[in-house]
């Protein structure tokens, strides 16, 4: 089954590479690439957001004729927020994740290879 993904998937172990009051905005973008979104606040601080989402269809979605009745799949997303001071030094970082399912599944997990 094919997966569809978008964005930058920042893993928890990657976050350990960035140390508040030491790492810089350039350090983060050099290692993770361009963020999904960048915001500069009035006080000169900057927020980088890295968002990621992936969807994996249920296997029964591919069964001819009845597949459309059970379309949907597993959905996983994460958002990582980096906050930098006006000098570009990391103040804080946060990672949130969520997962869920869409559609309907009639087969038990692992029923199909």
Image (spheres, rainbow, N blue to C red):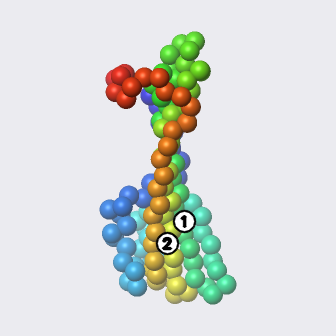
Which is more toward the observer, 68 or 100?
A: 100
Question: In the image, what residue occupies the spot 59% across and 20% down?
Answer: 69
Total number of numbered discs in the rendering: 2
Q: Are marks 1 and 2 in contact (CB under 8 Å)?
A: yes
Please report the residue visible at 59 percent of the width from the left and 21 percent of the height from the top. 68
Residue placed farthest to the right in the image? 42
Marks 1 and 2, how far apart in space?
Answer: 7 Å
Which of the 4 image quadrants contains residue 90? bottom left
Query: Residue 47: percent from the left, percent from the top?
Result: 56, 74
Task: Please tell me which residue is depicted at 57% across the width and 60% down the height of the picture.
Answer: 36
N-term mark: 1 or 2: 1
The numbered disc on residue 59 is none
Nearer to the camera, 107 or 82: 107
Q: Is residue 95 visible?
A: yes
Q: Residue at x 48, y 52 (%)?
A: 98
Above or below, 50 relative to 58: below
Relative to 90, residue 110 above or below? above
> Does residue 33 appear in this view?
no
Residue at image mark 1 = 49
Residue 1 figure quarter: top left
Please identify the residue farthest to the top as the structure is shown.
65
Looking at the image, residue 74 lies above or below residue 39: above
How crowded pointer 1 is (Cα within 10 Å; few <14, some 14-19, many 20+) is rated as many
Q: Residues within 10 Å of mark 2 (few under 14, many from 20)?
A: many
Q: Position of residue 93 (x, y in %)?
A: 45, 72
The x and y percentages for residue 112 are 37, 22
Q: Secondary structure at mark 1?
A: strand
Disc 2 is placed on an element classified as strand
- Taking depth in this image into account, of 102 and 4 the one nearest to the observer is 102
Q: Residue beneath label 2, please?
A: 82
Q: Position of residue 18 (x, y in %)?
A: 37, 73
In the depicted structure, whether residue 19 falls above or below residue 37: below
């Amino acid at each position: 089954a094919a997966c569809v993904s978008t964005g930058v998937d920042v893993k928890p172990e990657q976050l350990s590479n960035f140390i508040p009051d030491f790492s810089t905005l350039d350090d983060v973008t050099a290692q993770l690439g361009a963020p999904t979104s960048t915001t500069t606040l009035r006080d000169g601080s900057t927020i980088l957001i890295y968002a990621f989402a992936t969807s994996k269809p249920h296997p029964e979605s591919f069964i001819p004729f009845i597949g459309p009745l059970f379309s949907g799949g597993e959905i996983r997303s994460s958002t990582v927020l980096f906050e930098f001071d006006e000098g570009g030094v990391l103040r804080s970082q946060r990672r949130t994740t969520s997962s869920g399912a869409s559609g309907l599944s009639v087969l038990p997990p692992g029923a199909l290879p």
